[in-house]
Amino acid sequence: NRCRELLERTSSLRSWQVNLLHGQLPLAQQSAALKHCPDSCDGSVVLASAIAESSVTIDGEVRGKIGQGFVVLLGIEEADGAEDIDWLCGKITRMRVFTDEAGLMNKSLTDVGGGVLLISQFTLHASTKKGNRPSFTRAAKPEVAIPLYEQFIARLEAELGLAVETGEFGASMQVALINDGPVTITIDSKSRE
């Protein structure tokens, strides 16, 4: 199949995956590999919803709250690193999905001075291929995910120039939001989409 052909062009599956994850394959080869081998090549996944307001509650207490901006659900995978964080944070802050004076989606988060409510969400890496109970084996374990989650917060704060509101990693949370648009976009750090 197409995936096997791509693998045969490289020395081994392991080096091919490592090269792909670190962006060391030619762009055309990366793109083709990701289209034909999506399950073995996922990266950090972000679901960004433009909102009028949002909050997160844990154990009956509001822990984070923002007005206009993004609710960002972040799923981290074992192979993720600083490159994924940098690319995603840049995309989140510069993506033009907020309306301008003409009613067009032409303004970024930084243009509108919006905030971010960041929620860790390992279920974004769910696999529903077998049976009716999702598998979450592609999601990073806490010892990998927590440091990356903290790096993501710091990088996003640096990009925005303001504090990022968050939930609590691993906690049961209730997230309330009022979608604006509605606009909700999925971003994958490996496929760069």
Image (cartoon, rainbow, N blue to C red):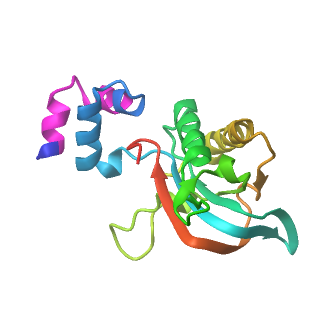
Residue 108 point in image, percent of width and height: 60, 50
Residue, far front: 102
Q: Is residue 100 above or below residue 142?
A: below
Q: In the visual, does 49 lie left or right of 64?
A: left
Q: Relative to the observer, which residue lies in front, 152 or 136?
A: 152
Q: Is residue 186 above or below residue 155?
A: below
Q: In the visual, does 1 lie left or right of 133?
A: left
Q: Relative to the observer, which residue lies in front, 162 or 152?
A: 162
Q: Is residue 173 among the parts visible in the rendering? A: no
Which secondary structure type mostly characterizes the magenta part of the structure?
A: helix
Residue 184 point in image, percent of width and height: 52, 65
Quadrant in the rendering for residue 65: bottom right
Residue 81 point in image, percent of width and height: 55, 33
Q: Relative to the observer, which residue lies in front, 111 or 82?
A: 111
Magenta stretch containing residue 5, yes or no?
A: yes
Name the residue rendered at 47%, 43% in the picture. Answer: 189
Q: Is residue 71 above or below residue 156?
A: below
Q: In the visual, does 174 lie left or right of 124?
A: right
Q: Is residue 46 among the parts visible in the rendering? A: yes
Magenta stretch containing residue 91, yes or no?
A: no
Start and end of the magenta stretch? 3-18
